[in-house]
Amino acid sequence: MKSEPEVYGIDDLAREGTTLWDGIRNYQARNFMRTMRRGDRAFFYHSNCSPPGIVGLMEVCETGLLDPTQFDPASKYFDPRSRPDAPRWDCVRLRHLRTFAALVSLDCLRASFTEEDLAVVRRGNRLSILPVPEAAARRIYTLARSEP
């Protein structure tokens, strides 16, 4: 799950403990989020920074929540076509599990995975939520432990 660290980073999540992962306005990313189940783990990826990469681990604690920003006209994520009786957007609640000692950079991921192994290494991939196959997740854990 990607976020820009200047907007919301792993340190924010660590300080708050839990957060709603709201503001998702891409149907494919939303649908990936809808497959999540309580207890699932997610990597926290810092994007649009230098260098980008995986900085920590989160756990899904609630699913199927309505994204409150879709109804808030003051929010940049307001969706005037979404109504309380027909919502379009939902979100999950995540809790901080750990911050990695060192970033697992996108360059490191590209050197370790093919595009078929891990979608985030695909050039031009802009989705903020992507599935990570179990085999790739185990390798990322190993990379996180081996980084200085």
Image (spheres, grey):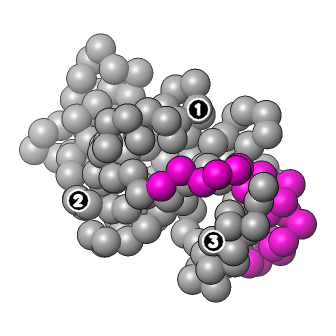
Residue position marked by numbered label 3 in the rendering: 141
Q: Residue furthest bottom?
A: 135
Check the image and name the residue furthest to the top: 74
Of callouts 1 and 2, the N-terminal one: 1
Asked which secondary structure carries label 2, the reply is: strand
In the image, what residue type sits under mark 1? Pro
Residue 74 on image: x %, y %: 29, 14
Number of marks in the rendered image: 3
Q: Residue lying farthest right?
A: 111
- What residue sits 68% from the left and 67% below the top? 145
The residue beneath circle 2 is 62
Measured as percent of width and height from the top left, residue 131 is found at 55, 69
Report the amino acid beneath label 2. Answer: Glu
| Residue sitting at x 43%, y 68% | 41
Look at the numbered discs 1 and 2 and tell me whether their residues touch, using CB distance below 8 Å: no
The magenta-colored residue range is 98-117
Q: Quadrant of residue 50?
A: top right
Q: Residue 77: x, y in percent?
A: 38, 28
Helix, strand or loop at label 3? It is helix
Q: Sort mark 1 into few (<14), some (14-19) or many (20+) by Cα contacts within 10 Å.
A: some
Cα–Cα span, label 1 and label 2: 23 Å
**Image height of 138 relative to 128, above or below:** below
User: Where residue 57 sits: x, y (%)?
Assistant: 50, 58
Q: Which residue is mark 1?
A: 5
Residue 10 visible to the viewer: yes
Is 61 above or below relative to 47?
A: below
Asked if residue 96 lies left or right of residue 121, the reply is left
The residue carrying pointer 2 sits among few (fewer than 14), some (14 to 19) or many (20 or more) residues within 10 Å by Cα, namely: some
Nearer to the camera, 80 or 143: 143
**Proximity of marks 2 and 3: CB atoms separated by less than 8 Å:** no
Q: Give 12 or 66, whichever is nearer the viewer.
A: 12
